[in-house]
Amino acid sequence: MIKERWPTELRLAKDKRSLRIAFDDGASFDLSAEYLRVTSPSAEVQGHSPAERKTVPGKRNVEIIGVEPVGNYAVKLVFDDMHDTGIYGWDYLYELGAGYAQKWQAYLDELAAKGLSRDRVR
């Protein structure tokens, strides 16, 4: 039986650029708004299959402007670019925190391979 992870703290930073989440097993993560935005579990980012997953550029300065509970199993994050369709379950947030180094590097590698930037094109 897999134990469900349960959050003990969920706090948006004053500058709205990171989200702190702590879990009942003692793990805690500070996840940047940019990281959360580009790894959104939404269909817009993830597609409907791994082949449809998008690499989202230009989100270096994105902010989280809303954190809305979804039942007792997740939160919906609202970003200042008006993206608000991702439902972040507790296990997904834990996975993002625990796998940060690998996932962030994979994202940076995808940007480079596609000639994209973390900065917004003006």
Image (cartoon, grey):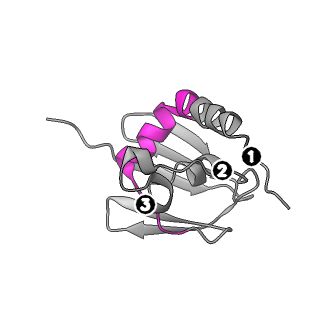
Of label 1 and label 2, which has the lower sequence position?
2
The dot on residue 6 is none
Determine the residue positioned at 75% across, 45% down.
117
Residue 60 or residue 77, whichever sits in front: 60
Main SS of residues in magenta: helix
Percent x, y of residue 68: 48, 69
Of label 3 and label 1, which has the lower sequence position?
3
Percent x, y of residue 72: 32, 63
Q: CA distance from mark 1 to mark 2?
A: 9 Å
Secondary structure of the residue carrying numbered label 1 = loop
Q: What residue is disc 2 on? A: 34
- Determine whether label 1 and label 2 are within 8 Å by CB: yes
Q: Amino acid at mark 3?
A: Ala
Q: Amino acid at mark 1?
A: Arg
Percent x, y of residue 21: 51, 47
Q: Amino acid at mark 2?
A: Glu
Q: Is residue 88 magenta?
A: yes
Secondary structure of the residue carrying numbered label 2 = helix
- Say which of marks 3 and 2 sits in front: 3
Residue 58 located left or right of residue 28: right
